[in-house]
Structure formats: structure tokens, C-alpha cells
Image (spheres, grey):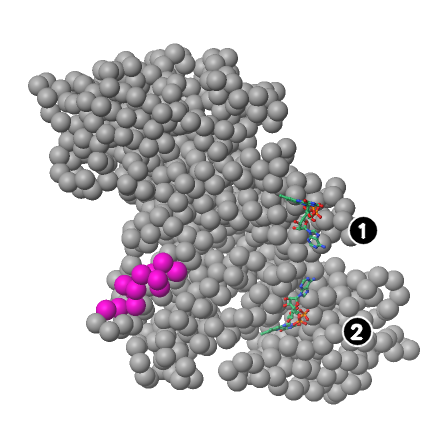
Amino acid sequence: MDFNLSEEQTLLKDSVEKFISANYDLNDRRKLAQTSLGYSEDFWKQYADLGWLGLPFSESEGGFGGDLIDTMIMMEQLGKGLILEPYYASVILAGAALRNGGTAEQKDKLIGGIVSGEIKATVAYAEEQARFNLNDVATTAEKSGDGYVISGTKSVVANAETADFIIVAARTSGDRADAKGITLFLVDTKSEGVSLANYPTVDALRASEVTFANVQVSASDVMGELDNGLGLLEEIRDEAILALCAEAVGGMDLLYQDTVEYCKQREQFGHALSDFQTLKHRFSEMFIEAEQCRSLLYRATLEKNNGSSEARKLIHALKYKVGKAGRFIGQGAVQSHGGMGVTEELRIGHYFIRLAVIDSMFGNFDYHLDQYTELMTIPEDKGEEDSMPFM
Amino acid sequence: MDISLNKEDLAFEKEVEDFLAEHLPRGHEMWTKRAEWFAALKEKGWDVINWSKEFGGPDWSPTQHYIWDKVSCREVLPPVMPFGQVMLAPVLMKYANKEQQERFLPDIRDNKVMWCQGYSEPGAGSDLASLKCKAELTDDGKHYIINGTKIWTTMGHVANWIFCLTRTSSDGPKQEGITFLLFDMKSPGVEVKPIYTLGGSHHVNQVFFTDVKVPVENRIGDEGKGWTYAKGLLQHERKGIAGISRSVYALEKLKEKAQRVPVGDSRLIDDAGFKKKIAVAEIELLALEFTELRSLADMVNSGSPGSQSSILKLKGTEMQQTIHELTLEAGGIYATPWGNKKFGPKFSKGGMEMYLNGRPATIYGGCSEVQKDVIAKRVLGL
Ligand SMILES: Cc1cc2nc3c(=O)[nH]c(=O)nc-3n(C[C@H](O)[C@H](O)[C@H](O)COP(=O)(O)OP(=O)(O)OC[C@H]3O[C@@H](n4cnc5c(N)ncnc54)[C@H](O)[C@@H]3O)c2cc1C
Ligand SMILES: Cc1cc2nc3c(=O)[nH]c(=O)nc-3n(C[C@H](O)[C@H](O)[C@H](O)COP(=O)(O)OP(=O)(O)OC[C@H]3O[C@@H](n4cnc5c(N)ncnc54)[C@H](O)[C@@H]3O)c2cc1C
């Protein structure tokens, strides 16, 4: 039993840390976010050179053969830097889609380019009416000759503007909210009929509403099984949640650490703010919540990595906990900074925002608590008398 | 990162399971076959698991202790009062002289002498070091004369002996001048008065000392150094309080019971609101189990528990209380007939007793507020 990082994992962690501290201070980030691209192509190239873009892909696919634990380490560090590059969209989301559902041809076509940084991709799963329900897909893909015609609009698609390919969930049969009848398609963003309305999100990243107006795709663009795309979407969601929560946990550590440091310096009423017991206790609770999130992150990631049947349940538990604790830690940090907490000047405000955004992605804490509750095991009642007098 | 147990540990887990299956008296036999159970434990060398090897302990690794807790918490073991074996013995093993060790440890091991803990006083609770109970050395240097009072003394009314923190000097910081003494509860001048806790139980007492004469041979270690000895002991107390594995098991049991509670034609376990509260508790425990494992892994790998360990007592006791509350809620109106074993859904005790008896967990062993202060100081550097 051992929670230490291997030598390679330590190297990975150190190299990301080094990159972030050299390139991602808050001012640089702000300037970068205001450029028209919204991130740095130069950094993207460096990510490729450092091997980060190939991390989750197997060596036979041209990647570096990392597992979910490696991705967790990567995302935690990237989370501390609040990076703007489309790592999450291209490597995590599209990567998960390709690895779990891509045909040999599709993998061939994309993975090499993703790893080298020449191709970017994203996944379009959400729709306006669906809220967090992955089943609810109104976008249709109708059979037409050898291929399909896709019509509909997808919501808040991460980094679609710079994606060369969009993997889209569309309905090939059944009613709008049926579990069956969903199929994923690999769509070239330049295809006729694809149009994008781009915007920044509050965390300084970019997203788009993506409309498909009679977009033609061929049968070879089907990703995963026809009509059974929900399973693949859920796989993507599981991996995405693990990555997002790793990012969140990285931010949580900095949130409580920065807050403690700030309150040690800041004097009011003739005392450092950190002398007040209410604040000490708030900080202890922030620390505890962050550690509890880390524990669940490790647990869910390890179980998923081992292919355990408990993994999905744990991932729901994790997303719930990170959402809840994220609120508590983020709000505690802002509150303890007083007026400074609500400015753009300190990084805590930006983590606070990012945690709120992460909670909204793939279902907020209420949603995941419901999902967890549904999957919770209820042991058979053996009708025993209460046998725990010393509890 | 790897959470699997190695081959030896898995074999040990099996050994514990087999041992319990063979020897543990269940149901009513828990009371009638106690002696056989303790004999079997002793024969196996598992009767004093927290003792060092030199004194007859099994010398388990932290992982083995963890496995024992995890397996045994699924059963009800005939209880052993913790005061002698768990709390006092480690202090004796570390700080007492050889003569004292030979005099006291064997009877503790065989449960022949029942001990109680005389620490808290009316004026010294969380701030234990401010205790005042006075011990004065007689002119001939052969005895201490004790005057003062101790409160919340659990089992003081049935205990044979007490280990007691007394004040031998008031000069200097309050942590100095505290002396650790052992004495017979039948000594002249000892008076025990019951304190009834919520629900009317009698477990705790106030104990008064008037000129109680204690031989110096009963002093552990040096005069005035008792605080150091006691502090080590408090750590042993705290370790036991978190009870995380047991809470996991208790929550499973609650899910079973909630199937027995009717809500019209439905069952409580199908009540969405109740079920969600169980889910929230379960998620917190899933996290806490791993926090404990992480602390254990640090212990195994580096010899000291990581900063996560500071969370265990605080969160562990909170979770116990959460489960008590849920159990109380599950009882509904049948949680109110006191001592109920007969009426309503099949709960021998309802949740009320758990609920009432469970409150002290966040008060003793370092109250939750003090635990948070400790985290702020040790972990956050405040
Ligand atoms: C949006 C906005 C608009 C404002 N507009 C105006 C304006 O128009 N004119 C004006 O004069 N001012 C204005 N203010 C300032 C406002 O009054 C101060 O922010 C407020 O008094 C708190 O002071 P502070 O920000 O320095 O926080 P601090 O005093 O540094 O306190 C920081 C945090 O420490 C904690 N804390 C503070 N004291 C204690 C204590 N004794 N015990 C325990 N915890 C404590 C609290 O969590 C608090 O939030 C504005 C502030 C904001 C955010
Ligand atoms: C059932 C039971 C059994 C016990 N058995 C024994 C025994 O066998 N032997 C023995 O010696 N003692 C025993 N105790 C005593 C126990 O150790 C004390 O109750 C404990 O140390 C708390 O002291 P107190 O009750 O005086 O509370 P106080 O110290 O008066 O504290 C009251 C409350 O104030 C708050 N508080 C305290 N300190 C702080 C702080 N620094 N910051 C913020 N808030 C704070 C907490 O909410 C705390 O609960 C027992 C207690 C109980 C309830």
C-alpha cells in the first residue's frame, strides 16, 4: 500500500510545475486570455514537445502510454496554473472518445495529430433542453444514402472555435430522451453546414454554440456503436470528471494556502486576521474539505484505473463532493480576503470562478448526488436484532 | 500509487477472519462465554494488541492493526474497558520502572483490575493542564497526600484503581508541576458520587479526595513530569475514537434497518429524502476511509502519520454522530419509548440511546474546536 508517486510521475509533476511557474503568472494569463485566439499556440507546441498531449494515448497509438493516474497528476498541476490551452477539450474529451470508441481508421487519422499538436478536437454532447441528462439528445442524424445528415444545435462546446474536429452526439433512432438511439459522429469542423457562435466563458476559456444544418457525414464517421452511443458518452464523462476534479483539487490547495498567507499579513483590529479563531477554524475546515476531496479523487481514479465495477459510483461521489467542497472552499477564500477577494487581482478569485464552472460541467453536485443515491447498494435485510450496542 | 494489500497482509486478513469465525461467541454467548473468548485471544497472542512485543503484544505493523479493525468492526466483540489496556498500559510500558511494570501490567492484561481515568476536574476540562487536585509529599518523603476532586470519571463507581493527574507544584508554566499517580479506589478518603447523563445512565462520577495517602512507589516517572506522560496517553485515546471502519459498518446496518420501517405501504429506505441523507454520509465515509488509508500509508512508509491524520478524530466523531442522528430519525415515534425493545419496528434500542450517548465523542479526547485549533497550528502554521 503506497500513495507515493513513481519516479516518472514525479518527473511529470515537476515538469508541469516548472512550466506553470515560468509562464503562467496572473498577468501573463490575463493578457493571453485577451488575445483573439485566447491561448498560446507556442505553449501548445511546447506541450507537444514535452509529451503532454500524448499522455493518455497508448504507445501503439503514438502516445506515451500514461494511465489515469498520470492524467490525474497532470491535471492537478495544470489546474494550479489555470491554463488557457485546449488541453481538456482535445486531450481529455476527444482523447477519451477516440480511445474508447474510435475505429482504427479514426484513431489513425487523429491521434498522431493530437499528440503532435497539429490537430485539435472537442466533444459536443450538451443541449439546451437536456440540462445534465446525456440521454436527452434532440440533434438528429438521419440516414441518407451511405451516410447521415446531422441537424441540431449543441451547447457550450469547449474550444470548438479552434477544433479541427468535433465529435457530436446525435439521435439516430428513438425518442428525444431515450437511452437507446444515440450515436457519436466525427465531424470535420470545416464541413458545410457547421456554424459556430463563439464566446468566452467566465473562467477566461472559450466555448461555442455549435449548429449543424444538414451536415453530411459518411458511415465511416460513426464513432463507437450505432444507436449505442450512450455508453461511450458515459465513458467520456467518467474520464472527464476525473480530470476536472483533479484540476479542482489542485486549485483547492492553493485556495486555502493563499488565504492563510493573506490573513497572516493582513491586520485589522490590531491583530493579524489569522489570529481570530473563527478564521482559524474556517481555514481548518477548508483544509479538511480539500483533503477529503483528494482522498475521493485518489479512490475514484485508482478504481477506474483498475477497471473496477465500483468506479462509476465513486465518480458520482467525487463530483458531488468536489462541487460541494468547491463552493465551501472558494467562498471561504473570498470571504476571508474581504474586498480584495472580489477583485481580479488575486488568483484566489480565479480559482473560485473555475470551481464554480467545474461544478456546472457534466452535472452539478445535486445531480451527482441523485445519481449516486440511485446506484447506492442496499444490503439485503437479514432481520437481525440491533447488534451494535457500543456504537 | 497502489492500494492493494500485499500477500502477507492478505494472509493476515484471512487469519483474523478465521480466528473470529472459530472463537468469537455470538449473540447471548457473548456474555456467557466471555472467559473462553479471552482465553482464546491470549492463547493466540492477540489479547493485548496495542502492547509492545516486550510485554506480550503481537508486534503488528500499522497495516495489521488496520486490518484487525476493519475485520473485527463487523462483529460485536465482548467489550474490554479501555482504561487499563489501551490507555494506561502504554504509559506504564514507556515510563514506569520495572517493579511497577511487573506489579501492574499482568493484572491489566488479564482484566483482573479495573482502572479509571482521573484527569478532568470541574475547572480543568479541555484546558486539562490547569488542573488543581493537590498532592503533597509527606515530611518523611514516603507518601503523597491528595486533596481535591476529579469529575466525569467513567466507571469510577466500579473501578478498583485510578490513574490520576495531580498538582505537586504551582510554580512555572501550568504544564509543569503535574504528577502522575496510581492508587486504590478503596483508599480512605476517596468518595464517589454518581452523575447521571442524558437518559438517566450512570457511567460517570465525581470523585472527591480528602487526605488520601498514596505511597511514593505509586508515582510514575518523575515528580512534575506527569504532563509529558499524559500527553502520550491522550494520543492513544484519540486513535481509538475515530472509529471509521465501524461507522462504515453501522451505516450498512442502518440501510438494513430502514427496510423494516414502514411508511404507509412503502419503506423508509425508499423515501427519497432519507435515502439521500444516507448517500451524503456514505460519500463522506468513502472519502474518510481513504484519508485514513493515506495516513496509514504515510505511517508505514515514513514512520509518521501525515497531516491528514489530524482530520481523523474530528471527522470520525462527526460521522458517528451523523449516523446516530439518522438512526434516531429512522426510529420515528418509536425512538421515544425509553429503553424500547418490544414495540414498533424491530429495533432493539431505537436510535435515541445512540443519539444521547454519542454526544460526548466530540467533547472528550480533545473537543472538535480544539482539534481545529490543532490543525491550524500544526498543519497551517498558525
Ligand atoms: C464591492 C464593494 C464595494 C465597496 N464600496 C465601498 C464604498 O463605496 N465606500 C467605502 O468606503 N468602502 C466600500 N467598500 C469597502 C467595504 O466596506 C470593506 O470591504 C469592508 O469594510 C471590509 O473591509 P476589508 O475589505 O478591508 O476586509 P478586512 O477587514 O480585511 O476583512 C477580511 C475578512 O476577514 C474577516 N474578518 C474581519 N474582521 C474580523 C474579525 N474581527 N473577526 C473575525 N473575522 C474577521 C472577514 O471574513 C472579512 O471578510 C466596498 C467593498 C466592496 C467589496
Ligand atoms: C461521557 C464522558 C465521559 C468522560 N470520561 C472521562 C474520564 O473517564 N476521565 C476523565 O478524566 N475525563 C472524562 N471525561 C471528561 C472529558 O475529557 C471532558 O469533558 C473534556 O475534556 C471537555 O472538558 P469539559 O467538559 O470541561 O468542557 P469545557 O472544556 O468546558 O468545554 C466546553 C465546550 O467549549 C468549547 N471549547 C472548549 N475549548 C475551546 C477552545 N479552545 N476553543 C473554542 N471552543 C472551545 C467546546 O465546544 C467544548 O465542548 C468524560 C466526559 C464525558 C462527557
Discs 1/2, front: 1
On screen, B14 above or below B134? above
For the residue marked with disc 2, what is the amino acid? Answer: Lys
Q: Is residue A181 magenta?
A: no
Nearest the viewer among B260 and B88 is B260
Write the residue at 13% across / 34% down. Answer: A173
For residue A98, say whether it is visible: no
- Identify the mark at residue B132; answer none if there is no mark: 2
CA neighbours of label 1 inside 10 A, class few (<14), some (14 to 19), many (20+):
few
Label 1: chain letter: A
- Local secondary structure at mark 1: loop
Label 2: chain letter: B
Q: Position of residue A221 (x, y in %)?
A: 20, 20
Q: Position of residue A103 (x, y in %)?
A: 22, 20
Report how far apart the C-alphas of labels 1 and 2 lie in the structure: 34 Å
Mark 1 Cβ inside 8 Å of ligand 1: no
